[in-house]
Image (cartoon, rainbow, N blue to C red):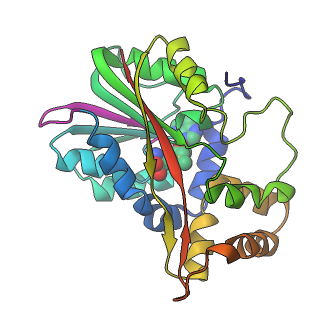
Amino acid sequence: MITKQNPRTAETNARLWGANAKDWAEIQEEGYRSVYIKAFDRVSIKPGTVYLDAGCGAGVAAQIAAERGARVTGLDATPNLLAIARRCVPNGDFQVGDLEQLPFPDKQFDLVTGFNSFQYAGNPEIALDEARRVSKTGAHVLIMVWGQPDGMEFTSLLAALRHLLPPSPPEAPGPFALSDEAALRAFATNAGLEPLDVFDINSPRRYPSLSVALRGLCSAANAIRAIENSSETAVNEAYTEALKPFRQSDGSYRIGATFRCLITRV
Ligand SMILES: C[S@@+](CC[C@H](N)C(=O)[O-])C[C@H]1O[C@@H](n2cnc3c(N)ncnc32)[C@H](O)[C@@H]1O
């Protein structure tokens, strides 16, 4: 069961996720393109589907849904990412907002997704409840989180910054708080959603060089937080060390990563 965090973190998230928005969009989020495609293959999107991506980031998932004919709305706390999303999906409606207080009336959407987003809200349960509220009866809400940490190569990169981050309260949920299937299903049930299928998507992260890997990794909120708490040099050094086992003979990097999705029904 996920523990409640501090109330309202949209402002903090906007600062952290917005610091290196271009790198996040071009390196990290673009690298998830195949993950979104596989997730969308499991839910129905057809021309006219009224779709919300909650925590849409730079709009890569929204762009794929729009290509499949959906009428796209994206919401995110980070204006710098939304500016990129608007350029990628000119017909989309992208709004700055808080996952915990969606600026939409009840029962608007046929499909809502949260790709690695609900868990960043100050209170993820409120965020998911909001996703349920704005969905039509019978609509699907898709939740994506990190896969199980055991045996996942990317876990070591997430752990690499631990000593550079400010101490977090003991009850604070870690990045894998919802990766356990029972926890994920309970998260949905608590928000009044009916959990349906759970499935994993394997998607190794690939970087053509160390410098691109560092730019990509340093665009995520936890890296910015670590930089603020220590220094950019310290974060780059920690990541450089953690990346070593994943260096390929051509100088590129490949790090195994898995995402877990739960499809729910309203
Ligand atoms: C890991 S990124 C995921 C972005 C995108 N969905 C993707 O798959 O790349 C987390 C996103 O959640 C957004 N976010 C975090 N907390 C938020 C909140 N309380 N309200 C709105 N957006 C939030 C951040 O701005 C960021 O874009």
Comparing 94 with 217, the one in front is: 217
Quadrant position of residue 102? top left
Vertical relation: 170 (above or below) 238: above
Decide if residue 243 is on the left or right side of residue 248. right
Across and down, in percent, residue 2 comes to: 67, 25
Q: Quadrant of the N terminus?
A: top right
Residue 45 lies in the magenta stretch: yes
Quadrant position of residue 203? bottom left
Number of marks: 0
Q: Residue furthest bottom?
A: 250
Q: What's the residue at 39%, 34% (across, down)?
A: 113
Q: Quadrant of the C terminus?
A: top left
Residue 32 lies in the magenta stretch: no
Vertical relation: 228 (above or below) 128: below
Q: Residue furthest left?
A: 47
Q: Which residues make up the magenta segment?
A: 44-55
Q: What's the residue at 13%, 33% (across, down)?
A: 48
Vertical relation: 209 (above or below) 21: below
Decide if residue 246 is on the left or right side of residue 202. right
Comparing 14 with 255, the one in front is: 255
Q: What's the residue at 57%, 18% (across, down)?
A: 186
Is residue 16 visible in this depiction of the protein?
Answer: yes
Across and down, in percent, residue 215 comes to: 59, 72
Is residue 96 visible in this depiction of the protein?
Answer: no
Comparing 255 with 132, the one in front is: 255
Across and down, in percent, residue 25 comes to: 45, 61
Across and down, in percent, residue 23 comes to: 52, 67
Quadrant position of residue 152? bottom right
